[in-house]
Amino acid sequence: MSRTMQWLVLTCGLLLMAAPVFAATQNAMLYGTVYDAAGNPMAGATVILENPALGFTRTTTTGSDGSYNFAEVPPAEGYRVTAAKGGTKLDIRAGITVNVGDERVILPPLKEQAATAAAPVVEKKAEASAVTNEMVSSTVSGVITGDQLRSLPLYNRNFLALGLLTPNTHDTEANSELLGASFSVSGNRPNQNNFLLDGSDNVASSSNQAVPFQVNDSVQEFRLISSNASAEYGRNAGGTVNVVTRRGGNGFHGSVFGYWGNDVLNADNPLSVYNGSTFDSAAAYAGPTSTTIVGPLVLSDFSPLRYNSYVAVAEFLGFCTDSLSAFTGVAGTVACTSGGTGGTGKNTRFDPAAVLAANNRFKPSFDSKQFGVNAGGPLVKDKVFWFLSYEGTLIKNPNPIFERVPTRFDKTYDPFATGNFNFPVTGGQQDYPLGACTSVTAACGSARGILSLFPNSNVVGVPGVLEFFRGQAPNFTHVHNGLARVDIMKSAANNFTIRYVAQGLNQLHDDTLPVQPNYPGNGAFRGALNQNINATWSHTFSTTLINEVRFAISRFNVSESAQDASFDATTLGLTPNIYPAASNFPNRGLSTILLNGMDAQYSGATPGTDGAYCSWFEYFAVGPCQAPTLDYLFPYARLGAPLNAPSSRRDDTWTLADSVSWSHGKHGIKFGVEYRNLNNHNFDGAWQRGLVYSSDIGEFTSDSSISCNQVCPGGFSESFRFPTFDFAQSQTKPYNIRLHSWAFAGYMQDTWRISPRFTVNLGLRYQYLSVPEERNDQLWNYDPVANGLVRVGHAGV
C-alpha cells in the first residue's frame, strides 16, 4: 500500500472516531487546465498557487488531461497561478480573487506561449469569478464582497442587510423577532437559515437567529447560498450564510472610522411620532364630534362603541359625562345645559384631531455615534499574522410618549363626597380585591397608591375623563463589538487559525412613562454578551490530500430586567386581600398593570344611583340603559415592566468538525463528519411579578361599574363595595429550564470534471439530532421578595 493510501486510511479512521460540528468550510476550490502551444492538454506541468501578502504557497501537478485543482484555498485577493515545466515558466494568471466557498475555474486557461527570442512570460489578469452560479457547481448563491460592505450605505451598519441583494432572498415578515437578524430564502421561514462564521456554527440554537456580530470592517465577505447547497452544508431547509473574517498579512494595514447622525439634520416624517400610543388608541374610538341624538333612541344607541356616541346618548337622556364634582353638584338625573351653566357638569365631545394638532410632532429625537478602529499585520513575516478590530455604537433615541394617565377625578376617593362607600377589610364577596379602605377618609388602598405612580396629565382631551401625558421617556442602545484573530503558517504542511469575537449590548426599551421621583419607569433593560471562538488546524498530507479540523464555541446570552426593579412595591402601604397573609404586597416587584375603560362616576354614578350607563345585569334584566360597551377600550399607559422581564436566555454550543479534501484524477472529493453539543438555558420570572388587568378604571378604583347599582339579585346594591379587577395572575416559581441535546452528521461529495466543459456534482449527507433532555444546573432564579436574581444550587441531571 502506498504512503498516500496509508495516510488516507488513517485519516478515515480518525474521522469515524472524531466528535465534529454542523459547519462547513469557508475555503474555496480552484480548478483549471494547462495547454501546450498547440492547444493540447499538457500533462505533468507544475502549477503554483501563491499569495505573497498571506505568505501562502501551494504546488500541484497536472493530470493526463492537463487539469489541476487546489482545495482549501483561503478566500482573499491577490492570488497568482503560474504554470511551469522543466524549470521554464509557461504562463501566469494574476489578480485572482478567491471568494468564500468558491468552486471556480481559472479563465482564460494557462497555455504554453509560442517560442520567441527569449521573450519573458507576461502576467495576464484572470477573469473575475461569477457572483451567482460557479462554473463547476450547481449551487445558486451570491457573494457580498468586502468592498460592498464598506461602500454601500447600511442602516446601523448591519452587514446582513446586504443579504437581500442575493437571488431568492426576501425580508422577514412584519414584527418578526428576527427582523434585521435574518431573512427569508427561497420562500422558507427566517428561522430556517444556517449561519456560519469562519466555517463554524454561529446561531442561537433556541431561535436559530444569527449570533449578533456587527464589525463590518472585520468582515472580509460573505456568501449566501439560496438553493442546491452541496452536501457539506446541512441542518436547515433555508439558506446558508457563510461569513469570513479578515486576516492580517505581510503588510501592515489599518483604518479608523466614525459616523454621526442627529435629528437636527432630519426632515419631518410623514406620520406622527405618536402613532401606536394610547392616545392613538383613544382617537380610534372617539367618533365624530358632531354626533347628536334627536330621538327617538334605537337599540344601537344603548350599546355605543364610540365615546362621542355615548356622550350624545347620555346628553339626550339628561346625564352629564364630565366635569362633575362635589363642589358643582351631582347631576346624575339633571339635564346638562350647554357649556355646563348652572354647575351641573358638561357633555364635552372628544376631538382628537384638535388635540393632536396642538401637540403633534413629526420628527423623533435621535442621536447616533458609530466609530471603530481596525489594524492587522505580521508578527513574523510569512509565518504569524494578527488582526484586531473594534466597533462601537451609541444610540440615544428617547421614546416620544402621548399616553392616557389617570385624572384628578380618578385619583380622588369618593369624588362626590357621598360618604356611603362600603369597603370592608374582611367578609363579604371578595372578588379578587386589590385592597380595601379602613375608613371613608382613607385613600382607597392599592388602587389609589398605584394611580399615584402615573405622572400628572399635561394635555386634556375631556376634563376629568380623557387626559394625557405628553413627553418622552429615556431610550438608548449601546453596543460594543470586538474581534481578534491570529493566523500561524507553521510550515508548508501545517496552518493554524485562532479567532475570537464578542458583542456586548446594553439597551433600554419599551418605556412609555417618564422617569419620576416616585417611579423609575416602566421599560426593560436588555443586556447581552455574545461570543464566538474558533480554532482551525489545516494539515496538507500531499498536493492532493488536505485535512482540516475545526473546534468552535458560541454563546448567545441575553437577559431582560425591569426598569422599575429598584422600586419597592411594598412601600405603597396596601392591604391586598388577594394575599390574605400579608398586610402589603408580598413582593417588592411591581406587577404589570393594564387599565382601560370609563368610570361610571364620570356621569354621576354613586352608591345606589346609576350614571349614564348601567351594569350588564341591568342592561339585560331591566333596560333600556346604556351598556358599558366602552369597557376594554381607551387604555392607560402600562404600569410595571413588559411581560418579558425579568428573563434570560443563554444558548451554548460547542462544535467539532473534521473534513478531508482529496483530489484524484478528475474527481474533487470531500468528506467529513460533524458534531454539535447544545445547551439551552431559559429563565422567565415575569409571572412572579404578576399581571393585573382591568377593563374599567371605575372597577379598579371603587367597583363603580362591574356590580349593579339599583336592581340586583336579592334586591340589594352590590356596587361600590371594594376595588376589583377582571384578571390577575402570579406564580410562586419562575419558568427555569436547561435543555441539552446533541447532533451528528456525516457527508461525502464529489465534483467530477468529466471534461473542461462538463462537470457532475454528487453528494450524500446524513444527520441526526437527539431528543432534548431536561437538566438542572447552576442557574439563576428570581426572588420576588427581594426583587432580584439569586443563584440556585447544582441539582444534577
Image (tube, helix red, strand yellow):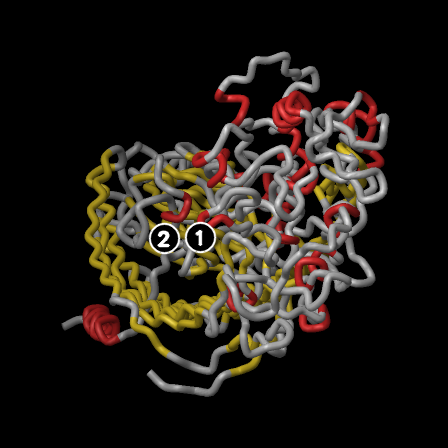
Q: Are marks 1 and 2 in contact (CB under 8 Å)?
A: yes
Percent position (x, y) of residue 245? 54, 56
Q: Is residue 738 visible?
A: yes
Q: Secondary structure at mark 1?
A: strand
Q: Is residue 362 above or below residue 424?
A: above
Query: Which quadrant of the rendered structure holds the C terminus?
Result: bottom left
**Of the image marks 1 and 2, the number of the one nearer the N terminus:** 1
Q: In the image, what residue type sits under mark 1?
A: Leu
Residues under labels 1 and 2: Cα distance? 8 Å
Query: On the image, which quarter does residue 653 sit in?
Result: bottom left
Q: Residue at x 69, y 54 (%)?
A: 420
Residue 615: x, y in percent?
Answer: 53, 40
What is the x, y in percent for residue 317? 64, 24
Closest to the observer: 306 or 209? 306
Residue at point 30% right, 50% down?
62
Badge 2 marks a residue whose secondary structure is: strand
Q: Residue furthest front?
A: 715
Q: Nearer the viewer, residue 199 or 226?
A: 226
Horizontal side of 279 relative to 624 (left or right) equals right
Left or right of 78 on screen, residue 651: left
Query: How packed is label 1: few (under 14 Cα within 10 Å), some, or many (20 or more)?
Result: many
Q: Nearer the viewer, mark 1 or mark 2?
A: 2
Residue 403: image quadrant is top right
> Quarter holding the N terminus?
bottom left
| Three-letter amino acid code of the residue under disc 2 | Phe
Compared across the picture, whether 350 is left or right of 556 comes to: right
**Which residue is labeled 2 in the image?**
70
Q: Quadrant of residue 542?
A: bottom left
Q: Which residue is mark 1?
A: 49
Count of numbered circles in the view? 2
- Residue 774 at x, y percent in the picture: 33, 74
